[in-house]
Amino acid sequence: MGKAIGIYLLLINVFTLTLFGYDKDMAEKGKRRVSEKTLLIFTFLGGTLGALIGMRMYKHKTNKASFQIKFLLTFIAQLFVYFFTFRR
């Protein structure tokens, strides 16, 4: 089970990082963007590290306070789910 979780986390983080990069590229081109809701859903599903790397690497969503607050709340919700799911 642990190996499967590790593979899942690797894949979701790589995908989330890619999603942030894609959204930044679309923003620069003035094309249809990935919704903030979608970015936050993949962050919540385990892509927190990928999202953080994507925000820093692409300098994307770092100056948007409303997104930063939503990101923080998503991370806190993720911690609660983890705590109540895996506590012993």
Image: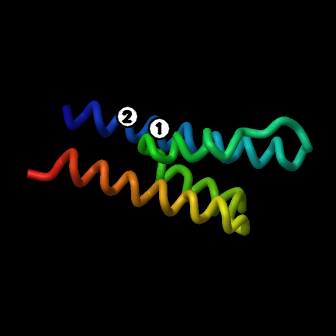
Residue at 50%, 47% (x, y): give it.
43
Q: Is residue 25 left or right of residue 17?
A: right
Viewer-proximal residue among 17 and 61: 61
**Which image quarter: residue 52?**
bottom right
Residue 71 in percent (x, y) is at 55, 58
Q: Which residue is mark 2?
A: 8
On the rendered structure, is 21 left or right of 44? Answer: right
Q: Quadrant of residue 75?
A: bottom left
Q: Residue at x 47, y 52 (%)?
A: 48
Left or right, 33 with reference to 37: right
Near mark 2 (Cα within 10 A), the count class, few <14, some 14-19 or many ≥20, is: some
Q: Position of residue 56 (x, y in %)?
A: 63, 63
* Quadrant that contains the N terminus: top left
Say what amino acid the circle numbered 2 marks: Tyr
Numbered mark located on residue 54 in the image: none
Residue at image position (61%, 39%) is: 38
Check contact, mark 2 vs mark 1: CB within 8 A: yes
Q: Residues within 10 Å of mark 1 (few under 14, many from 20)?
A: many
Query: Residue pushed farthest right?
Result: 30
Q: Amino acid at mark 1?
A: Ile
- Identify which residue is drawn at 55% across, 37% down: 15
In the image, residue 85 sits, relative to residue 11, either above or below, namely below
Of 85 and 23, the residue lying toward us: 85
Residue behind mark 1: 12
Q: Position of residue 22 (x, y in %)?
A: 72, 40
Percent of width and height locating residue 12: 47, 38
In the image, residue 56 above or below residue 35: below
Q: How many marks?
A: 2
Query: Circle 1 sits in a helix, a strand or a loop, which is it?
Result: helix
Label 2 residue SS = helix
